[in-house]
Amino acid sequence: METGSIGPQCLRLIKKYWFMVGLGAVSLITVADHTLILAGWGNWLKQRHAPDLVIIFIFIFTGLALTPEQLRLGFTDVKGILLAAFIIFVIAPLTAALFGQFPLDTGIIIGLFLVAVMPSTLSSGVVMTAEAGGNAAHALVITIIANSAAVFTIPYTLTFLLRIIGESASLTIDRTAMMLKIFLLVVLPLAGGLLIKFLWNTLYERIGSKLNIVNQGLIIFIVWIALSQTRSILLNSGYTVGLIIVSVFVFHGILLIWGWGLIRVCRREKGNWESILFMGGQKTLSLSIILQVSLFPQYGIALAVCVIHHIVHLVMDGYWVERIKSQND
């Protein structure tokens, strides 16, 4: 290979895998920034609810990109919803229970428990489903149902898991507040995007092809803010961080294997299985952080588990998005 061809080839690879490159770059730069400028801005934005605002824009853009046929299939694919729910509410907690049998640091195990009982992520799974050519509307339905059901499942599932390691916690979740948050962050912006598309269809025709790219950029923005919160923990626990990365990689890998297995066994067709794969394994970050801070403040490393899992599952699923897109092309 000629030296002159290396540069253009690298640029093509970066362009093709820009989402994964962006995740890695943001993670490294934020952690390596000893001036704390990036982390400081990230924490400042977090305190002013910037992630919530970003999620609102993601679902406005998602509503703009949806088609009537996608909406119809999304609400009528009950089997797909049940398969995703099975991974979210049964496989994930049971997998975390297995990790509880290993001699890991208690903070790591509690962090995995918190991740396991979470519902599907509000934004990234929907974005990746659409990017991989799947039905974004079906992913949205899974998100809304899973997050609504989690209000009732988390207290029981987390209590069960904590008993495995002899821990206990009094869990109280404001159900009304959580339902309101889902409505304000997901349902209302989605309806707004659909309305904009209906009233100004020419706008979608001009920018529609760019919406998924914009949404992926917004996901990277959320990751930066999450990393800003845990930078000090990551730097002060080198060996532990390595162990966390391996643990969450294996944990999410198991969920992906289950997802692929259920898709194959149930013979899901192209366009109808991507939402199961990505929504089944991806877990929301914000609620896990809230529970860690309120219930387990003595286990700061559990917070690192929640954040690192979020980054790792985005990288792993980002890889599969690119693989699926390559196969489609």
Image (cartoon, rainbow, N blue to C red):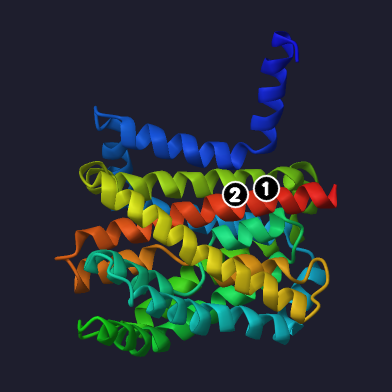
Amino acid type at circle 2 is Asn
Tell me how far mark 2 sits from mark 1, CA to CA.
Answer: 6 Å
Q: Position of residue 129 (x, y in %)?
A: 67, 61
248 shown above or below 178: above
- In the visual, does 229 lie left or right of 54? left
Q: Position of residue 12 (x, y in %)?
A: 71, 27
Q: Position of residue 258 (x, y in %)?
A: 61, 74
Toward the left, the furthest residue is: 298
Which of 185 and 139 lies nearest the eye of the viewer? 139
| Residue pictured at 33% horizontal, 83% vertical | 161
| Residue pictured at 70% horizontal, 58% vertical | 130
159 shown above or below 236: below
Q: Quadrant of residue 297?
A: bottom left
For label 1, the crowd category at 10 Å Cα-Cα, with few meaning under 14, some 14 to 19 and many 20 or more, is some
Look at the image and tell me whether residue 314 can be seen. yes
Q: Which residue is mark 1?
A: 211
- In the visual, does 27 lie left or right of 109? right
Which of 300 and 75 lies nearest the eye of the viewer? 300
For label 2, the crowd category at 10 Å Cα-Cα, with few meaning under 14, some 14 to 19 and many 20 or more, is many
- In the visual, does 148 lie left or right of 320? left
Q: Which residue is mark 2?
A: 215
Tell whether label 1 touches label 2 (CB within 8 Å).
yes
- In the visual, does 175 lie left or right of 132? left
Amino acid type at circle 1 is Leu
